[in-house]
Image (cartoon, coloured by chain):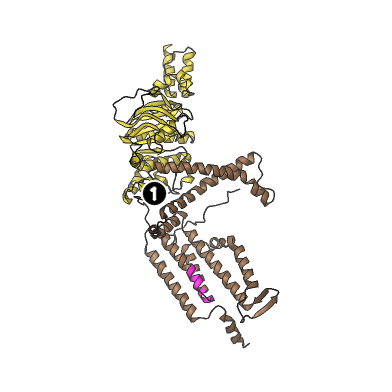
Chain colours: A yellow, B brown
Amino acid sequence: MQPSAAPAAEDAAPACEEAVRFENVKYTYDDEEGSFAVNGVSLCIRAGEFVAVLGRNGSGKSTLAKLINALLRPTEGKVTVFGMDTSDTKKAFAIRKCAGMVFQNPDNQTVASVVEDDVAFGPENIGVPREEIGRRIAAALNAVGMSEFRYATPSRLSGGQKQRIAIAGVLAILPKIMILDESAAMLDPKGRREVMEIVKKLNREQGMTVLLITHFMEEALQAQRAVVMHRGEVVMDGTPEQIFARADELETYNLTLPRAAYICKRLQQAGMPVENAFNAEELARKICASLQKG
Amino acid sequence: MLNDVTFGQYYPAKSFVHNMDPRMKLLLVIAYIVAIFIANNFFGLLLVTFVLLFFILLARVPFGRVLRSIKMILFLIVFTAVLNLLFYTGGENDIVLAKWWIITISWQSIINTVFLAMRLLLLVLGTALLTLTTTPVALTDGIESLLKPLKYIKVPVHELALVMSIALRFIPTLMEETNRIVAAQKARGANFETGGIFRRAKAMIPVLIPLLVSAFRRAEDLGDAMDARCYSGAKGRTKYKKLTFTWRDLLGFLFFAALITGIVFLNIYLLGRFDIIWQVQEWFGA
């Protein structure tokens, strides 16, 4: 069953309280012999972890996300979500119940013309009784700070608000994993911040496992762990700090550093003894420290 | 150019009619249509008119708003009226007023024209009142609920209703997109405002094609999003919103039952549509 070809750059911990496990997964959109969108990925995501998946367009990160909730099934290898194999069509429902997904375009994932009806869509699908749906809508909208918009029309809301409704729609299913596939990419900076705040809060307060797919390096800084994908393979895996410390390697994957980290690196290159910093505040502090020392 | 297209014509207000169950409203509109068609004299239609006026008052919708709905089918009404007036022939009893080639105008054709125009007007105004007092979503829910029995002959009622409500939901989105594409094409020098109708229709092609392509892309995305939210058809699905009949619906039902009975009585005990002619002749001893 297991092909012996070793995955490129992978050292997944063998024993973890696993939420998602990829075992040498390959996926191709092309039925004929073609390139693999995901090419031999082995990865383990622990329950409660906040993981950012980074990569350029076409690096396979979205495909990776869709493999988790059985929207796609691996061509080769095996994906399990809390022990459930996604290749098992009978388990698709249970898997999607436990791994919710928020997509990129907020307009294309709203089903109903009223916010509360849209949030109710998921619970309705899994057969939650009526009274319970009402409670879940209230809780989900509260969690994303949109309670006052319960009876509003989604098309009149801002992008960030629409995306928060989409998150509420997923929360109402009570998933254990939340996958955000470029969910903030189409939003303005304010909307992006709103979404990130909510995601962080969910991870921190509810212990939600979060998988954040993005090409914004700044977003990855919020995560506990960052995974870099390139041409369908996982090429880097570590804390965001570890990843961004390897700037040259990132560059070969056409990724750039977060702005603060970039400035920091240039300062170092210019001969200023600044310690590594990744966000603006940290950078300011480190620069002050180095100036005081000097 | 599409800014003035407001979708639907729901008139938000709190009223007896607004608060009725959409299912009952749909049934009552059907009863109303039946009433219009079984009424075979002017008294029947007059009764229907009174009922309509009463419900418009009850719905607290301005008369102007209701009357506006005629605009769209005014042409149809005039067209059928003219045809009726010129070409109607009832039989040998016709009292012909003018005749030329295949055109005949008789008392009967005049009466018939008025009668049919009234029917059409009442029909449009009544159904307009339904859409003025019911949101598209409530209407969809109502239709789904009413069609539920068809499930047993394997009609995918739930799916059809979902398709309908998603279509409604995407109208503002696609409208926005159309405006965006129009602006983009204008920026590239496209001209939508001048030229004849064919020229203008042709100018819309560069708008419609990108719109269609994007609609397909959206459909694919939406399909994924629905799958991700555990959608798997009507089986095992619960419904959050429940429609309930209230005293309002009972009152409405009784009212319309009375209307239909009234019209049947008028049909039986009063004169037919054309008898008014003989009546008038009798009065004036012609």
Please name whichever residue, B3 or B243, is drawn nearer the observer in this view of the structure: B243
- Residue A153 lies, in percent from the top left, at 46, 48
Output the chain of dot 1: B
Please name whichever residue, B171 or A63, is drawn nearer the observer in this view of the structure: A63
- Residue B257 lies, in percent from the top left, at 42, 71
Query: Of all residues shown, which one is farthest toward the right?
Result: B100
Span of residues in magenta? B33-44
Q: Which residue is mark 1?
A: B233
Taking the spot 42% from the left edge, 49% from the top edge, the residue there is A151
The image quadrant that residue A178 belongs to is top left
Taking the spot 48% from the left edge, 44% from the top edge, the residue there is B219
Taking the spot 58% from the left edge, 49% from the top edge, the residue there is B2
Residue B30 covered by magenta stretch: no
Q: Amino acid at mark 1?
A: Gly
Q: Is residue A61 above or below residue A98?
A: above
Please name whichever residue, A228 or A195, is drawn nearer the observer in this view of the structure: A228
